[in-house]
Every structure is written in C-alpha cells, then in structure tokens.
C-alpha cells in the first residue's frame, strides 16, 4: 500500500511543474494579448491598410544612415528605439549651428536633449501635459529651452512664435506616451506650414488599442495624414524600427502585426536644393498667393493687349 501511494505521489510531483508551466504560459498570453476585448465595426480595408504601415520598407533614399551620437558608438536610444539620421549632403547636423525640437509627454526623459546639447544645438523641449500650468517654462541650460503646452495647443503656432520661416529645424522628434495622438500633431504642423522647414522627422507611431482610438475614422485619419507627408510635403521614410514586443496576433486583421514603431523621415526638399542649408523650397500652401498674383497680372496684360489689337 505504501508503495502504491509513493508512486502516486511521485506522479503528482512530476505533473506539478508541467501544470505550473502551462498556467504561466496561459496567463502570459492572456496578459500579453493587447487586443483582448477589442471590437471593430468599421471598414476592414481601412484597418488593414493602417496596420500595413508597419510592414513597409524604408525608401532607399539616404546613402548614409548613421546613429545620432556624441562619442557613443551605440548612439542615443529612447525607449529602446535608436535615433537615426541621414548624413547625406544637405541633411548633416552641423555642430554649434543646429536647431532641435523634442515633443514629448515624459517629464524625466532628457536623453535626446542632453545629446544634442553636447553637439551645440539649440533645443526646444516641449512637454505636452493635461495641465500646462503644472510645469513652468524655463531654460534647463544655455542650450535647452523647456516649455509646457496643453495637449490641444498648436505646436505649429508655437514654432512660428519662436523663429521666422527661414529658420531650419535640423531634427524633430515626437514621442508621446499613453493616450497621445502623434497624428494630430503632424496634421497641425502641416496646416501651419511648419513641416517644410524640418530636415529630420522622427515619430513614435502607436496604433495599439490601449493608446489609440480603435475606430474607422481614426484609422482613415492616420492614412490621410501619412499620405500627405509624402504627396504634399515630400517627406521620405528612410528608417523604420518596429517594436517587437507588440508583434502579436491581431484578431481584427486575423494575423500577427506590429502596432508600435518609430518612423524616421527626411525632407527631400533639402536634397533638391543641392545640399544648401539656407534655402528651402516653398510649400504648396505658400505658393498659392504668389500664383494668384501672377495670374491676376497676366490677366491684366491679356486684357490690355486685347484692347490694343481691337
């Protein structure tokens, strides 16, 4: 009898670790499944196209992609994302003659600001907060100027107040935390015609359901904004760093997808200017008033010549 009990106890003892492993794996997948309880009632083509943004490959437009660093070969990493820049002619960040904007929601993250300060760049660090009065504007150093803005305030209007349209921005990073909307900021920069002065644009993209509105209108807004970056503003995607921790099964599109990444664009207008860092090609919106004046003058000359011939 004792021998039988001993064998039974031994079997149970052997099964216990397997059971524990099974439970750990089960609960891990339950916790890790960021799409649990997510419902989507919109157009499936729209949501599929939105998540396909994470599948695209960078355009082979930059011959020299390097890490932004100052003496550190590993470069600067923010939330495990390496910060890349294009070192081709016209895109280099010139020491002691550069301007950088950091738009963020994390109060205590200063990695990028500290790095570009050592390069000698003038840095505008913009903290987006629900209550912009909780942090007072101040100069963190002679180079780093810190400001707190409301979540709905216009970044474009803020940039306009800081400098003239001739002032170039060598590097702009947008990295928002939970509940942020980087696409609204991109749209605001386009509407205020501030994007065409930016050489490098690095944006933390997040379509995970705990961060973004999981609706058709939001995904369509994302696609429209992304398309404008290329079609209207000539921004070329030269680097992509997907967040591998978000590569899980997405029941909405019925396949594994990423939902967070860092996209890096360069403004192709600077290459078209032969590498000059003092000129810029006017945006489509800036050309419209000039075209109206030109058409009006042409019309006056046409009427004058018609009157002479008659």
Image: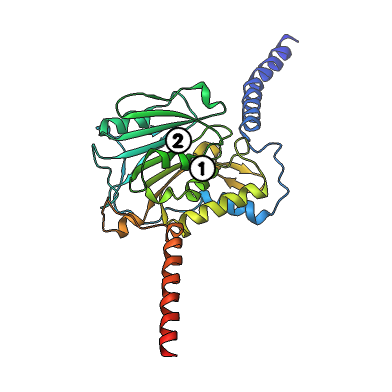
Find out whether the residues at labels 1 and 2 contact each other: C-beta distance under 8 Å: yes
Rendering coords of residue 236 (x, y %): 41, 54
Rendering coords of residue 117 (x, y %): 30, 31
Residue drawn at (43%, 33%) of the image: 80
Q: Say which quarter of the image contains residue 307.
A: bottom left
Residue at image mark 2: 103
Q: Nearer the viewer, residue 16 or 25?
A: 25
In the displayed structure, 255 sits above or below 100; it is: below
Rendering coords of residue 131 (x, y %): 56, 26
In the displayed structure, 65 sits above or below 228; it is: above
Residue at image mark 1: 185
Residue drawn at (23%, 38%) of the image: 95
Q: Which class describes the residues within 10 Å of circle 1: few (<14), some (14-19), or many (20+)? A: some
Q: How is the image coloured?
A: rainbow
Rendering coords of residue 232 (x, y %): 47, 58
Q: Quadrant of the N terminus?
A: top right
């Amino acid at each position: 009898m004792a021998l039988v009990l001993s064998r039974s106890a031994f079997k149970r003892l052997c099964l216990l670790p397997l059971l524990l492993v099974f439970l750990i794996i089960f609960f891990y997948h339950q916790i890790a499944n960021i799409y649990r309880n997510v419902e989507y009632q919109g157009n499936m083509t729209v949501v599929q196209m939105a998540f396909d943004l994470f599948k695209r490959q960078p355009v082979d437009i930059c011959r020299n992609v390097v890490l932004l660093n100052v003496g550190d070969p590993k470069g600067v990493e923010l939330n495990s994302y390496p910060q890349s820049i294009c070192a081709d002619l016209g895109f280099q960040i010139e020491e002691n003659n550069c301007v950088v904007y950091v738009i963020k929601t994390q109060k205590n993250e200063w990695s990028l600001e500290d790095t570009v300060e050592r390069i000698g760049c003038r840095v505008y660090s913009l903290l987006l907060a629900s209550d912009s009065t909780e942090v007072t504007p101040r100069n963190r150093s002679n180079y780093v100027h810190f400001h707190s803005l409301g979540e709905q305030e216009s970044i474009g209007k803020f940039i306009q107040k800081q400098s003239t349209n001739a002032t170039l921005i060598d590097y702009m990073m947008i990295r928002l935390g939970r509940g942020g909307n980087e696409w609204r900021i991109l749209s605001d920069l386009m509407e205020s015609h501030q994007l065409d002065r930016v050489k490098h644009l690095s944006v933390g993209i997040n379509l995970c359901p705990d961060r973004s509105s999981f609706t058709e209108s939001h995904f369509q807004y994302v696609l429209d904004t992304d398309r404008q970056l290329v079609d209207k503003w000539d921004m070329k995607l030269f680097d992509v760093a997907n967040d591998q921790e978000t590569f899980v099964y997405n029941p909405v599109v019925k396949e594994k997808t990423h939902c967070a990444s860092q996209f890096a664009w360069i403004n192709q207008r600077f290459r078209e200017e032969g590498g000059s860092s003092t000129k810029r090609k006017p945006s489509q919106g800036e050309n419209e008033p000039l075209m109206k004046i030109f058409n009006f003058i042409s019309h006056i000359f046409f009427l004058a010549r018609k009157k002479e011939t008659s």
